[in-house]
DNA sequence: CAGTAAATTGGTAGCGCTGCCAAAAAAACC
DNA sequence: GGTTTTTTTGGCAGCGCTACCAATTTACTG
């Protein structure tokens, strides 16, 4: 943690008084409005029937007292919780903010609240965090992919809340699943490169044990190459997370070892951009000397001097659909949103 | 004849059972362990005293029944809520995921839960979302910057929960504030460009009415230029959000109108990267023909063939410190984490 | 206008847990 | 052994709200 540089501060007495704020309760509103508690509750939730006159009186009292309903109490008293728990691997990988962005818009419209925690791609941590999440009795738990510990699965199943597995459709869903096929993405990427005539193809990727979806793409990529008699020429796998820096470093190492490659497949667009920059810096001309192919379809890839050849994934839409399924309480199903291969100019 | 055991009819009954999953309660654990409810509560929270033997019995019962504590009930019964509410402008701008990332690590360690919603840079929406958040009685509300509606301020003040304003220190904090000075950033950026000898300086920015922090940077940037007899030569302000695409477009327009600029200041690194790509594509040599200066210190800016000249802001640290102040219940204060000017190679 | 249906209301029992208090058990003391 | 002290326990009243039901008022029949 960085050192704290702080300004002069007021005394700590203030903090105490600050904490013991008198909270207005529904009973007080009822009293002030001269109606019963259940009437106030009905008016505020716009549920059940009440006359226009009482509604006005209640709303006036709410306004006057500055009443803020207590959802904790409300949730405990009723059945469903209108909390949606996201247990995601990372916030550094743009995929997840995009997912949250799509979902949060839909959730907010429906008065749901998003809670999240970050597993750092660690299944054990996922289990612990999922348990912590279930303590809030969420309406749904949103996870990435299909790979969970037995404990996680058991716990989620027992919880009775909706489970949404996002970003993958290659496997057996626990309940709901929304995403696209990573295997198909790997396959089509390989097919595209082969169709363009590349035969000496390499791979630069980040830690595959952690990001199992990148692992799925890679393995079907390799299978497809193998099936066309152009097996993967070389690979460079970096320990850290997917990043531009690792992409550049990875390509540098790969080319040092195997200089005669004619194309490189990257685990992600940020890795691919790193490779792109490496080529720019070294004067390697793209795609004539070396072709580059990414994955994700980041906006930045469209604006580079040569648009990046990649696969665009519907990340925001995945979040939206996932949220939509939850708020509509849809029956168990797998939704494959597909992806789009962007030909670009780097392959 | 064998006795007829009536099957449950397929229909509503089954659905009911399905929804209302037999949730194990603390009382059931107490019963199973042969102890009182408060004993179970004490053991689980590791609070108060109990013998090793009862702890084992309780834990065994918890394990056996698969008990998951209900935090909703716990929070209602006790005082503090261990929920921290983030009300952030956006998830597209990398700043906010970084902020969340820093905070969530600290919060998770301390068994706090992060809740978030996205205002889309709209103060009215911020007010509505803050109200919705307060309904969960969070321990703290984390916001961006100092610019809030009167209603928001009033509500937050009345709530009695901690308030953290992040990413800015130029103004009067409501309670806690963590960040850095955007005014100083604008000033230092201008000073740097002037020191390097640039005199015909332009600006490319995104919507400043919404992103008030970018507005603060811009205005002190201009003031500094003016104070050194090199007033801003031209500006191009795009309606949309900060993005690589808008940066490229903005620079193109700016140069079309005012071709003799020798340096351009961008509202953000992603905008600056767009400008950088534009120069690459048009063969404008950097920095001899045109210098580029950004803001934020994105990782990608370090990996481009020429490292981007920019100001690196402690975004993750801001989240960390903000969370730390909340979990330690620190007295009201403003923490200025400062920033770092990266000379780079583009200016 | 009685007589019934429909629309409004209020009372109250929990939701599952924690905090307080007093009771019971164990340990320490003279 | 008889106390006093300390440690462990259990009981139970809420936390603030919603769901259910019954009571009340109002609207609508013929």
Image (spheres, coloured by chain):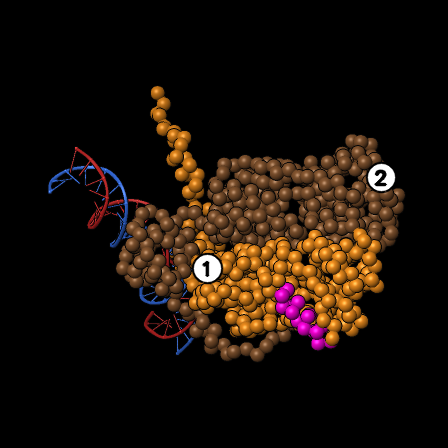
Chain colours: A brown, B orange, C blue, D red
Q: Quadrant of residue B236?
A: bottom right
Give the residue number, with chain letter if any, for mark 1.
B131
Residue at 60 percent across and 71 percent down: it is: B169
> Residue B272: x percent and y percent?
73, 59
Residue A56, placed above or below residue A225: below
Q: Quadrant of residue B99?
A: bottom right
Residue at 54 percent across and 58 percent down: it is: B122
* Res. A175 in view: yes
Instruction: For label 2, count other residues whose C-alpha is less than 10 Å away and answer few (under 14), some (14-19) or many (20+).
Output: some
The chain containing the residue under callout 2 comes to A
Tell me, yes or no, whether the highlighted magenta stretch contains residue A11.
Answer: no
Choose between B299 and C24: the one closer to the eye.
Answer: B299
Q: Which mark is residue A200?
A: 2
Q: Which residues are drawn in magenta?
A: B214-228
> Residue B274: x percent and y percent?
73, 55
* Res. B300 in view: no
* Magenta highlight: main SS: helix
């Amino acid at each position: 943690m960085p050192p704290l540089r702080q300004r002069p501060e007021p005394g700590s007495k203030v903090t105490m008084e600050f904490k013991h704020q008198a909270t207005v309760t529904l009973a007080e509103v009822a009293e002030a409005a001269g109606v019963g508690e259940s009437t106030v509750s009905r008016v505020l939730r716009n549920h059940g029937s009440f006359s226009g006159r009482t509604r006005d009186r209640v709303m006036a009292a709410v306004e006057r007292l500055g009443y803020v309903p207590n959802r904790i109490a409300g949730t405990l008293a009723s059945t469903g919780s209108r909390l949606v728990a996201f247990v995601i691997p990372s916030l550094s990988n743009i995929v997840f903010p995009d997912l949250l962005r799509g979902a949060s818009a839909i959730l907010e419209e429906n008065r749901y609240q998003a809670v999240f925690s970050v597993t750092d791609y660690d299944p054990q941590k996922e289990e612990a965090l999922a348990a912590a999440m279930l303590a809030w009795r969420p309406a749904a738990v949103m996870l990435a992919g299909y790979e969970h510990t037995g404990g996680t699965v058991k716990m989620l199943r027992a919880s009775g809340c909706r489970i949404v597995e996002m970003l993958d459709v290659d496997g057996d869903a626990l309940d709901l699943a929304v995403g696209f096929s990573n295997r198909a993405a790997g396959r089509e990427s390989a097919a595209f490169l082969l169709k363009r005539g590349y035969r000496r193809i390499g791979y630069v990727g980040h830690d595959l044990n952690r990001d199992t979806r990148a692992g799925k793409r890679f393995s079907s990529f390799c299978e497809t190459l193998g099936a066309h008699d152009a097996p993967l020429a070389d690979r460079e796998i970096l320990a850290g997370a997917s990043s531009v820096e690792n992409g550049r470093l990875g390509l540098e190492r790969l080319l040092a070892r195997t200089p005669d490659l004619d194309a490189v497949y990257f685990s992600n667009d940020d890795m691919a951009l790193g490779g792109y920059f490496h080529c720019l810096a070294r004067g390697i001309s793209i795609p004539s000397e070396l072709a580059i192919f990414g994955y994700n379809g980041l906006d930045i890839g469209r604006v580079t001097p040569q648009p990046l050849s990649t696969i665009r994934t519907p990340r925001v839409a995945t979040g939206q659909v996932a949220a939509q399924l939850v708020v509509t309480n849809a029956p168990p199903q797998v939704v494959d949103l597909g992806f789009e291969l962007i030909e670009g100019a780097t392959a």
